[in-house]
Structures are given as structure tokens and as C-alpha cells.
Image (cartoon, rainbow, N blue to C red):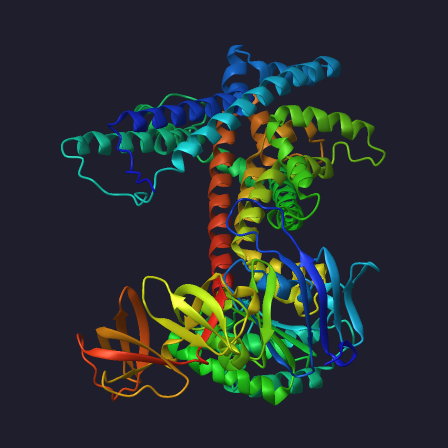
């Protein structure tokens, strides 16, 4: 995708805060991304990684130190030319973490507000009615139109916030951890709905979250951020399967870490595990890591436990171990297996019947092991 | 990680904390007393007991007024009070520093007083008697007697309502009441509107907010009488003829009560989640629309309590109108002072009692209405 056909284009965006000594400063350094129209894009990372700062810079709630922010052919911010469109003229929809529903207004008034204060054009009474109804219908809240905003549940407030954000049919929708204040069951439900709704209205969306499950499930593209920098920008599948560094591998999904010494071997690599006679193969080849201490990531669901007398399948690593914990969690079995001094987490089918103390083979594919600098 | 146990009253830390706090409090009362004018004027002046404030007052009321002398005196007083307030600020900040490490044992724990309960009960009763019951019954007595006389059973026979009749039948007092209500209500309204903007600037740390906050808080240093003398001189030299009008009194009130209005608005804005405003801006609202449509309505509870507070203290303020009122801009408190100085104690008492009753009704009604309004708009 070239920058010219991108809908939202952020380049070399930087914003640093004077460090006040209270927790992470949370700035952003040199962020670059370009999104095609209709993309669901997620900024993912731990608190203080700069994801919210990036979002607030796009919204205009923060003024960047440098960089360019462009939506379509409109330049919102350009440090070099001194352009900075005031936030109330950017015509962006935004949902805040606290929902920010105005408590002194009804649901209708909350949603109508952006139309009433719009600066680019005037909306007549009839059009306001029609547009608000349409937005409330989209979030399935039409029935509560005249209710006072204080008499809404968390989930309903969230929908009002969403309706308010889309009522002007903005070209860009910004979502700042909108699901973090909901309880677990509702959160799962809203994930689906939010994603469906976004696809339905086709608005380019930037979503900020620290929840990797949310990010993986909802996004077209994810940017993983760490200490103010984007460390990987890719599709959810790619982020999960080919994390660009140990931080991403550890942050997105859970994983087992094995340490050892790497050497090249044919088209792949072999790692001699520390504190163990065993070694594992990996089809990845990272020449720069040969002869060095490395960390190997193996995801729990890629591990298969097999009988000690079974034969080793092709392209599979095998460690010998003993089950130290077996727990049934409904959809799957969770095991902990010990191999020498290694403790590995493994998921099995809910019908698997290994018990604590069983001797097992710990098998995982040579393509399931990712090697990173230690 | 360190654990802090709440300090009990018996250990040394608690005692040091209490002593610091008590000293700060004592200093505060001392400052207020230096500035006090009403009590020394009413009780002290007739007996020729003069203090700083009464001397100041007398010098300005002499014919011809000794304005230079009064101004010099004012500056001296300002310096004294300013220095003491600075000291107080430092001390109370220190006391707060102690207070902030009370940990989580903050919730008040009721405890049995045992035999001490009788003493505690007595202290509360005596306090009530001295602070409220005694003065009111004395005023009631005076208002019902034909002339000022001590409380005796035999005097009961001379009970009269002629003072009440005098107050009610005179259109003069009605005019005063209207003046007082107008200037107090006007002041409260202007102060709270200004405070809305200033408090918002300060609470949201907008550029220049620190200076605005400092400027608005400054009048706290001025004793009422000193501010009055300053405004008297301004009024005399002002290009628009506001000298001797209610406008000048209103201006003085606005300056004097801005700090209070500011505190109400400031803490009110702090209660409003800043995302509520940001949501308005992202929605397209400019600053004026945000203030008018979001911050203003959400601040109504804070603004109304501030309004009522300022309305009530302005209505009873004496030192400023005493210096600034012209013949047509008298207020109730000025009239009471004059009546008292003329020896018409009975009428002062009748007027005072009726005024207190009236203001109590106004305040209660206002409070009820405001509460109902905020209930209907916020639903909780």
C-alpha cells in the first residue's frame, strides 16, 4: 500500500513528556503507519508504551513534537509546515475509556450533540432527528432514546458513546480501550458486536488496548508498541506466529521460554538447551544469532504430549518429561510438564487423560519454535 | 514497603501532630481577630476601647476624613496580616504533611467515652447555649422591651411590640432590605460566573491559570476595612460616578468574595472527569460551547452552593458598606450600626431578629429548590 492511497497516514510521529517521576512517561517516538480505508487497526502494548499518546495525537488532544498526521487529503498536523488543525474541526468519532457520557442529558441529547455543534455545516431539526435515530438503531438502543443518561448500564453507556461517535459519519473512528470497564462476559459480547458494526459502517478505525486477545480477534492489522516505539506491525496471525522479538512473543499470547546456545544447521538452527543434554531444531535461520545465547519460544498449544513408546513424527522436537499438573478447564486440558529443570505449559484436548506423575514425550514441531536474542 | 499504623492520641507522634495543628489554628483565629471590625466597633468603641480597625474607621469618618493617615495605617495592617497569613500557610501545609501519612486508618471509629460522656455532653450544651441560645434570647428580650434593660421577671410587664411596628411600618427599612438583597444577589451571581471561568482555567491548568488563581486569591490578605478604604479612594477618582452607589459596594463585594467563589468552582471542576470535556471538543464544540453546554450545567450544584454562601455573607457584611454606602445605597447592616450608635437598641434587635428569620427562610427555600433542580437534571 503506498502512502498516497492510504486513508490515515501517520509518519515519524513523536511526542515526549517531561518525566515527572510518576510511573512511565508514556511518550511515542517515530511512529509510522498508513491505513487503507476501512481498516480495523489496533495499537497494542502494556501501559506507558505510547499507544494512548499516539491515539490522542491523532485526535488532536495532544500536540505532537514532530511528524505528520494526514487523513485522506487533509493534513491534521505537520510539524515542518506548522499545520495543526484544532481538535474540534477534525471531524473524528472517538469513544473514551470512561465513555464520557454527559450525565445531564438524555440519550438523544448525547448523540445529537456532535450534530448541534458541528462547524463544517448546519444540521436542521429533521436531519438531526433522522441521524440520531439511525445511529441509535445501529447500536440497537433506539428504545432508550429519551432515557436520562445516568440511568444506563455500563454496556448501554458504551453503546451511547459509540452512537455519538458515528452519528456524523466520520471518516475516522478512534477507540480508547472502550471495553476495559465492562465485565468479562459483556466484554466478549461487545468485541463481536464492535467488530461487526465497524465492518458494517466501513469506517477506518484505530483501536487502543492492552488486551492481546481483543487485539487478535478484532483487528485487520496490529501495531505492537514497547516504550514509545512500534516494534512490530503485521496481521494478527503474523504477530502471533512470527513475533519480531522476545517482547512481542511474550506479550501476545502465552508462551514457554527455553534458553540455550544456538548454532547453524543446514537451512535451520539447532539450540543446545542449557542445563540439559537435549537440543531442539528450528526451521528458522537467524545467522546473527549463531554461536550465541538465545531464548526459544514454544507456545503451549503447539505442544503435543505422547506416550513414551510412540515414534517421533517427522519435523518434530521431542523432550522427555513427567506431568506435574493436570487441570480440566472445560474447553481444554492444561498441563504442566517437567523435563529436567524445565517447566513447560501445554494445552491438550479436553478428552486427553494424562495424570500427574505420568511419564510423557513432549513433542512440538520444528516450525513451532521461534528463536530470539537472549 | 513500610507499614504505617494510625497514630493514636497517646503516642508522641500524635501529640506533635495535634500541637502543630492547634498552633496553626490558633494563629488563624488570631489573624481573623486582628482584622475583625464589627465586634470592636459595636462593643469596644462606646467604651472607648480602641483597636487597629476601629482607629482606622474613626480616622476615615472624621470630618474632614484623614485619608492619608488611614491609608498609611492600612498599609501597616496589610503587612502584618500578610506576614501572619504567610506563616499560617507554611504551618498548615506542614500540618497537612503529617495528616497525609495517616495511612488507611482514616475512617472515624466511634469509641465509648465511659464516665467522660457527661462532661462531653455538658460541653456541647454549654457551647450551644453560649453561641446560639444566649445571644438570640438577649436580642429577643431587647426587642420586646421599651428601652434597653436587664432581664428581670418584673420587667415582663412592660413587654411591647412597638419596635417591630416601627420596623414594619417604615418604608425606609423595606428600601434597605431591597438594597441589601439586590447587591448581595448581584454580587453572588457575578462572582460565580467569573469563578466558573477562572476555576475552570485553574483546575484544567490552562496557560496563565496560575497567575489568574494568584490574583483572585490575593484579596484574602485584605482585611475588610482596608479593602473598603482602597475602594473608597478608587471610587472618588473613578471616571464613572460610582461613588456612593450600590455599584461601588457591589464591586467591593466581588473583589472580596472572588476567592470563595473560586474555591467552590475550582473543586467543582475537579469533580468533572476531563474526558467529558474532551468528548465535547472531539464532537466539534469550541471552548465557549464546552463551558456553556457541558461544564456549566455540570457545575450547577457547586455554583449554587457557592452562590448561596456568598449571598449570605454579603448580606451580613458590615465593614465595606459602612465605608462605601452613600445616602441612597444603605444596607441593612449599616442601618443597624447607625441605630445602635444612636442608642436605639430595641429597634436594632427587632430589625436584626426579623432579618435573621427572613434570611433563614430565603436560604432554606433556595437550598430546597436547588436540590430538587439538581435531582431532576442528574437523577441521583
| Direction left: furthest residue | B115
Give x and y (percent) for residue B241: 82, 35
Give x and y (percent) for residue A316: 38, 83
Q: Is residue B248 left or right of residue A273?
A: right
A48 up-or-down from B192: above or below: below
Q: Quadrant of residue B380?
A: bottom left
Give x and y (percent) for residue A193: 50, 85
- Using the image as rendered, state which of residue A87 and residue A328 is in the foreground: A328
Give x and y (percent) for residue A64: 70, 58
Q: Is residue B51 visible?
A: yes
- Using the image as rendered, state which of residue B38 and residue B224 is in the foreground: B224
| Direction front: furthest residue | A266
- Using the image as rendered, state which of residue A352 and residue A47 is in the foreground: A352
Question: Residue at left 36%, top 28%?
Answer: B17
Number of numbered callouts drawn: 0
Q: Quadrant of residue A333?
A: bottom left
Q: Is residue A210 visible?
A: no
Question: Residue at left 67%, top 47%?
Answer: B194
B94 up-or-down from A367: above or below: above
| Quadrant position of the N terminus of chain B in the picture | top left
Amino acid at each position: 500500500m503506498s502512502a498516497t492511497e492510504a486513508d490515515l497516514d501517520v509518519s515519524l510521529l513523536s511526542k515526549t513528556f517531561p518525566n515527572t517521576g510518576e510511573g512511565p512517561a508514556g511518550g511515542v517516538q517515530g511512529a509510522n503507519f498508513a491505513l487503507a480505508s476501512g481498516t480495523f487497526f489496533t495499537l497494542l502494548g502494556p501501559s506507558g508504551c505510547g499507544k494512548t499518546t499516539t491515539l490522542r495525537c491523532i485526535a488532536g488532544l495532544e500536540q505532537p513534537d514532530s511528524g505528520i498526521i494526514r487523513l485522506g487529503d487533509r493534513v491534521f498536523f505537520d510539524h515542518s509546515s506548522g499545520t495543526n488543525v484544532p481538535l474540534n474541526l477534525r471531524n473524528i468519532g472517538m469513544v473514551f475509556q470512561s465513555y464520557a457520557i454527559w450525565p445531564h442529558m438524555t440519550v438523544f441529547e448525547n448523540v445529537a450533540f456532535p450534530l448541534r455543534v458541528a462547524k463544517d455545516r448546519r444540521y436542521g431539526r429533521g436531519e438531526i432527528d433522522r441521524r440520531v435515530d439511525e445511529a441509535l438503531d445501529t447500536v440497537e438502543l433506539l428504545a432508550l432514546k429519551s432515557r436520562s443518561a445516568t440511568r444506563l448500564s455500563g454496556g448501554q453507556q458504551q453503546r451511547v458513546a459509540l452512537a455519538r461517535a458515528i452519528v456524523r459519519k466520520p471518516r475516522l473512528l478512534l477507540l480508547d480501550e472502550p471495553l476495559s470497564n465492562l465485565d468479562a462476559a459483556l466484554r466478549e459480547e461487545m468485541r463481536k458486536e464492535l467488530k461487526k458494526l465497524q465492518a458494517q459502517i466501513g469506517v477506518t478505525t484505530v483501536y487502543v488496548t492492552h488486551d492481546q486477545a481483543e487485539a487478535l480477534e478484532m483487528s485487520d492489522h496490529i501495531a505492537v508498541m514497547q516504550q514509545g516505539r512500534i516494534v512490530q506491525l503485521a496481521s494478527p496471525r503474523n504477530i502471533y506466529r512470527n513475533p519480531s522479538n522476545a517482547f512481542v512473543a511474550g506479550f501476545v499470547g502465552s508462551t514457554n521460554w527455553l534458553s540455550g546456545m544456538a548454532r547453524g544447521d543446514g537451512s535451520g538452527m539447532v539450540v543446545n538447551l542449557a542445563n540439559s543434554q537435549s537440543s531442539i531444531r528450528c526451521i528458522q535461520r537467524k545467522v546473527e544469532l549463531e554461536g550465541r545465547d538465545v531464548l526459544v519460544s514454544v507456545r503451549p498449544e503447539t505442544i503435543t504430549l505422547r506416550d513414551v513408546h510412540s515414534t517421533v513424527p517427522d519435523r518434530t522436537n521431542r523432550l522427555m518429561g513427567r506431568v506435574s499438573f493436570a487441570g480440566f478447564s472445560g474447553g481444554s486440558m492444561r498441563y504442566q510438564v517437567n523435563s529436567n529443570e524445565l517447566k513447560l505449559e501445554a494445552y491438550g484436548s479436553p478428552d486427553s487423560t494424562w495424570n500427574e506423575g505420568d511419564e510423557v514425550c513432549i513433542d512440538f514441531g520444528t516450525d513451532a519454535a521461534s528463536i530470539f536474542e537472549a | 514497603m513500610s507499614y504505617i499504623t494510625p497514630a493514636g492520641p497517646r503516642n508522641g507522634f500524635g501529640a506533635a501532630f495535634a500541637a502543630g495543628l492547634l498552633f496553626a489554628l490558633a494563629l488563624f483565629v488570631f489573624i481573623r481577630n486582628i482584622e475583625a471590625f464589627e465586634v470592636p466597633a459595636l462593643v469596644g468603641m462606646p467604651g472607648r476601647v480602641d483597636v487597629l480597625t476601629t482607629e482606622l474607621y474613626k480616622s476615615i469618618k472624621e470630618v474632614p476624613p484623614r485619608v492619608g493617615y488611614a491609608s498609611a495605617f492600612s498599609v501597616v495592617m496589610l503587612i502584618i496580616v500578610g506576614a501572619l497569613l504567610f506563616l499560617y500557610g507554611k504551618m498548615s501545609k506542614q500540618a497537612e504533611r503529617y495528616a497525609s501519612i495517616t495511612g488507611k486508618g482514616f475512617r472515624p471509629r466511634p469509641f465509648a467515652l465511659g464516665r467522660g460522656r457527661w462532661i462531653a455532653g455538658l460541653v456541647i450544651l454549654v457551647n450551644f447555649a453560649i453561641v446560639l441560645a444566649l445571644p438570640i434570647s438577649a436580642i429577643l428580650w431587647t426587642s420586646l422591651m421599651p428601652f434597653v434593660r436587664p432581664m428581670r421577671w418584673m420587667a415582663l410587664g412592660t413587654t411591647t411590640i412597638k419596635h417591630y411596628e416601627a420596623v414594619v411600618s417604615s418604608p425606609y427599612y423595606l428600601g434597605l432590605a431591597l438594597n441589601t438583597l439586590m447587591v448581595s444577589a448581584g454580587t453572588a451571581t457575578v462572582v460565580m460566573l467569573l469563578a466558573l471561568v477562572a476555576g475552570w482555567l485553574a483546575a484544567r491548568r490552562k496557560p496563565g491559570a496560575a497567575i489568574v488563581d494568584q490574583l483572585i486569591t490575593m484579596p484574602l490578605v485584605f482585611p475588610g476595612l482596608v479593602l473598603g478604604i482602597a475602594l473608597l479612594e478608587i471610587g472618588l477618582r473613578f471616571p464613572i460616578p460610582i461613588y456612593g452607589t450600590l455599584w461601588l459596594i457591589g464591586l467591593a463585594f466581588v473583589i472580596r468574595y472572588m476567592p470563595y467563589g473560586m474555591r467552590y468552582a475550582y473543586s467543582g471542576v475537579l469533580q468533572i472527569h476531563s474526558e467529558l470535556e474532551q468528548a465535547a471538543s472531539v464532537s466539534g464544540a469550541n471552548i465557549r460551547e464546552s463551558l456553556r453546554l457541558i461544564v456549566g450545567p455540570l457545575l450547577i450544584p457547586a455554583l449554587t452552593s457557592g452562590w448561596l454562601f456568598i449571598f449570605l455573607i454579603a448580606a451580613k457584611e458590615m465593614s465595606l458598606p459602612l465605608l462605601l454606602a452613600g445616602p441612597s445605597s444603605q444596607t441593612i447592616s449599616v442601618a443597624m450600626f447607625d441605630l445602635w450608635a444612636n442608642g436605639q437598641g430595641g429597634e436594632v434587635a427587632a430589625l436584626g431578629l426579623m432579618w435573621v428569620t427572613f434570611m433563614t427562610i430565603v436560604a432554606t427555600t433556595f437550598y430546597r429548590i436547588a436540590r430538587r433542580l439538581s435531582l431532576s437534571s442528574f437523577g441521583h
